[in-house]
Image: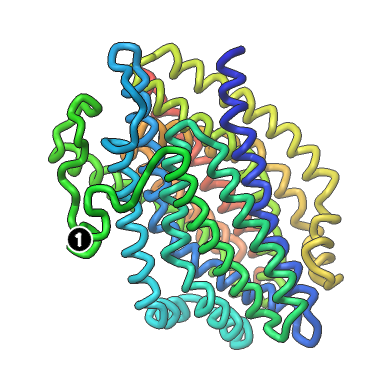
Amino acid sequence: MKLNREILRLAVPSILANITVPLVGMVDIAVVGHLPGTDSAALIGGIAIGTMLFDLLYWNFGFLRVGTGGLTAQAFGRLMAPCTKTAFSVHGELGGILRRALRIALLSGVGLIALQWAVVWLAFLVVDCSPQVQALASQYFYIRIWAAPATLSLFAFKGWFIGLQDSVRPMTADLLVNALNILLSIGLGFGTPLGFAGVALGTVIAQWTGFAYCLLAAHRRYGFSPLHNSFIHSMLSFSLDPKWCQEKKLSDYESTDYATSFFTLNRDLFLRSVGMIAVYIGFTVISARYEDMMLAVSTILMKLLMIFSYFTDGFAYAGEALTGRFIGERSADGLRSTIRGTFAWSFGLAGVFMLLYGLGGVPAFRLMTADPAVVDAGREFLPWLLLMPLIGCPAFTWDGIFIGATASRDLRNSTLLCAVGFFAVWFIGKAIAGPSATPETAIHILMGAYFAHLAVRALYLTLRAHTITA
């Protein structure tokens, strides 16, 4: 019972925060979908393609959250282990993890701003969409890109807080960012002449506000200072900060070993992100080829599918934090109990979502757009929603556990394999359907490919679970 309470203590705040994540996307779509004077499907397509471009960029930096969370959780476990328990401090190993991640985040964000025009040009060499959707997506991108340093830094902060077994600070940050984003999207979209552009500007303001909050929270709660150990100097000199742990007793690794481990981990996690990008970007790029109507339908379907992932990610984050902690403490019993407990809660949640998807599919579509043609076109795809809880649950839950174990090689391999599965199902299905296949048939094949990728991911990680419990 004590472990269940700990799982809920970590999961519930994350779930509350994650609830607002799909709401932001849904509100953005709802705002542009109700703007007067412009084709609703084109506006929704512009948001979809613009968001896809940021997914393309930001998922490459997923290691800033994933790697930071796993390393921090294990370092926290070593600190809390009965044989080495010492006074809690973020001025050694724990602070070094966050400072290194923030250096990468801020420098990368500035680099993305500098390369923004090249990114858009390259993207539309691949993405095939109508000229109106392309113009809207480009406008959205050029505004929102100015939040890049803040957005990437928030990845690092979230992983660090979760690794410290603290789900309250990231919850508060997410609630602040997402609530402000929603309010600004509505206010700037409907209440000013900005209209469509106001949705992107609201995101920029919200992200920088969240960055300021996290910096203040890390300092006030844990005494973290970015200026510690010449942070600014090391940023400007691109230092790798080889003296990772100032207090040798806090780490089992020499500084050079830690640097090697850090970059090996992030290399694997970067390749993992490439696999995820290939699937989710491929989904949007393919759907964009089948008219603005099918792009709008598939975009709304994906938003609805992701609602479940944001809920179950709460338990995945709990599994991540506790897995890393028990590995740091070298508690095999705690690790096995964590895996059993997180799966039990996740599958219970899956049952609830199957009921919600079964009853609320059409009303959810109506919330996303006022265009009855889009709602009618989406009706035949609603049965796909019922598969998400069954197949997504093991995939997302194992993901959190493997992240906590910093099992980056298995995470990398699972995601690259699932990308292969996605495209294999798509091309085989398309070949069977033939060139005369309707746009509706193509989207059904695309949905099948999406769920195939989840199934491959879940199966691979299940087969590899023995490597982290041995």
Where 433 falls versus 290 (above or below)?
A: above
Q: Which type of secondary structure does the marked residue at label 1 adopt? A: loop
Point 23% across, 28% down: residue: 251
Q: Would residue 106 appear left or right of 316 to someone viewing this image?
A: left
Question: Which residue is more in the foreground, 146 or 375?
Answer: 146
- x then y, percent, for residue 78: 32, 23
The answer to whether residue 388 of the structure is visible from this angle is no
Q: Quarter of the image for the N terminus: give it.
A: top right
229 lies above or below 200: above
Q: Residue at x 32, y 41 (%)?
A: 95
- Measuring 20% from the left and 38% from the top, which residue is drawn there? 258
Q: Which residue is mark 1?
A: 238
Q: Position of residue 316 (x, y in %)?
A: 53, 35
Q: Residue at x 37, y 43 (%)?
A: 224
Q: Quadrant of residue 466?
A: top left
| Badge 1 density bin: few <14, some 14–19, many ≥20, Cα 10 Å | few
Q: Please identify the quarter of the rendering in which residue 111 is found.
A: bottom left
Quarter occupied by residue 189: bottom right
Image position, residue 94 (x, y; %): 32, 37
Q: How is the image coloured?
A: rainbow
Identify which residue, 333 or 15, lies in the foreground. 15
Disc 1 marks which amino acid? Phe
Total numbered badges shown on the rendered structure? 1
